[in-house]
Image: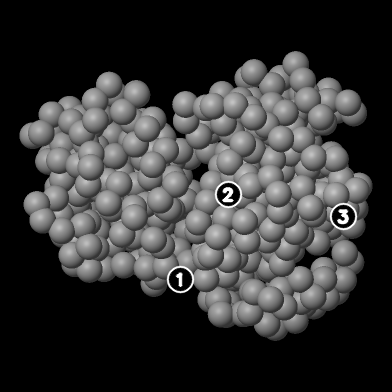
């Protein structure tokens, strides 16, 4: 495993069916095998259905602007595995991925899952880099999540809605309780306004953890995420000098969160002028908030969509919401084994909205030209794995992993 391509192929090829329920014990064993690097980290731990990646990014940016050395761990990635593990905005180097993957492979249990191995790599890297603080986003859940080995200075739960119900529960209350598993003894927890209070309050009470609830009516996700991140900065500013940097940090958003593409790029590549937005709204709640923001931003209520989704999502609810605002929905397939086929997706979308196009390059061109003819913006949305291909086609100079490696990783 002496190249980055081989290291990531090993990571991405790990057994994705490793049981969720034994994850915590397996992760603890693996961490102990490499010196328990998480035990030396000070961190902020963020769970939730939507918004957690944005909150992590904003909080980490405040620390970076204030002059601290800060680690940021998020998932999934858009273009490269290296995006998941950052220090002060710099992606983990390729040679570090090779070296740490070899260390994990040699010393840790063979049945370590992809996300567990990636999380352990982040712990090791942040320890090596001597970060002052690490901001950690959970993967699928909370209680059994690989990141839950940490003991944070502050816990955050961003929002709760129905997603990953086959693992986390079929009601928002059940999911909230699972996410509340990140709450540690005596560690304060901040929750967003769309987190059911009861289940989280019970866990916080049992753990003797102060609970702070951000309240209010927010126009969109970014405003809500900003309010949660600001509250976190206020609490952390009792020890860390971050309050003065909050306004600048709150302006930062991760890639593909209502990311508007320069119209000159579209005109140069496709010969038409059209507004294009990339947004990883991959569940019904995300789709609802995407439309709310798009309607305000563009002062209209009709759009063309380019959509690619994973099979395990509540696709019917997603497309039902989209149809209400759609001139057309171009259905395509993301580079992911769990991706729903374009024809199957088009059948769910139904006539007259659906246009099936499995080939990504043609799908993007079809959607752009359709939006130009209709005189409406194009919203490109769905799974994270759709964005990798779209950004590449639009000429973004990301560091891209090998396509085969990218295609096989379809988990957090």
- Residue 390 position within the rendered picture, expressed as x and y whole percent measured from the top left: 32, 48
Q: Earlier in the sequence, mark 1 or mark 2?
A: 2
Please name whichever residue, 173 or 250, is drawn nearer the observer in this view of the structure: 173
Q: Nearer the viewer, mark 2 or mark 3?
A: 3
Neighbor class of circle 1 (other Cα within 10 Å; few <14, some 14-19, many 20+) is: some
Which residue does the numbered mark 2 point to in the structure image?
Answer: 160
Visible residue check, residue 165: yes
Which residue does the numbered mark 3 point to in the structure image?
Answer: 206
Which residue is at 15% across, 45% downward? 328
In the picture provided, is 106 more to the left or to the right than 54?
right
In the picture provided, is 81 more to the left or to the right than 272?
right
The N terminus lies in which quarter of the figure? bottom right
- Residue 73 position within the rendered picture, expressed as x and y whole percent measured from the top left: 67, 49
Which residue is at 41% across, 35% downward? 258
Q: Earlier in the sequence, mark 2 or mark 3?
A: 2
Please name whichever residue, 285 or 14, is drawn nearer the observer in this view of the structure: 285
Secondary structure at numbered mark 2: loop
Which residue is at 45% across, 71% downward? 408
Which residue does the numbered mark 1 point to in the structure image?
Answer: 408
Visible residue check, residue 272: no
């Amino acid at each position: 495993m002496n190249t980055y391509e081989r290291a990531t192929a090993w990571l991405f090829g790990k057994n994705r069916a490793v049981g969720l329920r034994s994850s915590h014990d397996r992760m603890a064993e693996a961490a102990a095998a490499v010196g328990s690097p998480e035990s030396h980290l000070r961190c902020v731990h963020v769970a939730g259905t939507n918004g957690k990646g944005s909150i992590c990014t904003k909080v980490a940016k405040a620390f970076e602007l204030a002059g601290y050395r800060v680690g940021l761990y998020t998932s999934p990635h858009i273009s490269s595995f290296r995006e998941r593990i950052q220090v002060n905005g710099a992606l983990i180097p390729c040679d570090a991925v090779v070296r740490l993957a070899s260390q994990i492979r040699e010393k840790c249990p063979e049945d370590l899952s992809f996300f567990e191995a990636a999380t352990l790599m982040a712990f090791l890297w942040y320890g090596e880099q001597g970060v002052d603080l690490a901001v950690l986003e959970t993967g699928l859940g909370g209680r059994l999540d690989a990141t839950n080995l940490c003991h944070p200075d502050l816990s955050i739960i961003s929002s709760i809605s129905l997603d990953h119900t086959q693992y986390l529960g079929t009601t928002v209350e059940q999911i909230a309780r699972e996410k509340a598993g990140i709450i540690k003894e005596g560690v304060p927890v901040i929750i967003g306004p769309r987190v059911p209070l009861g289940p989280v309050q019970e866990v916080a009470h049992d753990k003797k953890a102060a609970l702070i609830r951000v309240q209010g009516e927010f126009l969109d996700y970014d405003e809500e995420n900003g309010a949660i991140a600001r509250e976190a900065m206020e609490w952390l500013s009792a020890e860390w000098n971050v309050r003065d940097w909050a306004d600048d940090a709150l302006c930062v958003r991760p890639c593909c969160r209502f990311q508007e593409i320069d119209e000159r790029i579209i005109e140069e590549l496709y010969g038409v002028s059209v507004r294009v937005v990339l947004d990883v709204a991959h569940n019904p709640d995300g789709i609802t908030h995407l439309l709310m923001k798009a309607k305000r931003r563009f002062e209209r209520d009709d759009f063309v969509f380019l959509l690619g989704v994973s099979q395990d999502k509540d696709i019917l609810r997603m497309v039902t919401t989209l149809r209400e605002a759609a001139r057309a929905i171009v259905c395509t397939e993301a580079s992911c084994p769990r991706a729903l086929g374009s024809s199957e997706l088009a059948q769910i979308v139904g006539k007259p909205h659906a246009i099936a196009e499995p080939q990504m390059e043609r799908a993007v061109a079809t959607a752009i030209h359709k939006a130009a003819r209709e005189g409406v913006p194009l919203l490109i949305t769905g799974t994270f794995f759709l964005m990798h291909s779209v950004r590449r086609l639009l000429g973004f100079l990301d560091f891209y992993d090998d396509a085969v490696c990218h295609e096989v990783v379809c988990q957090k």
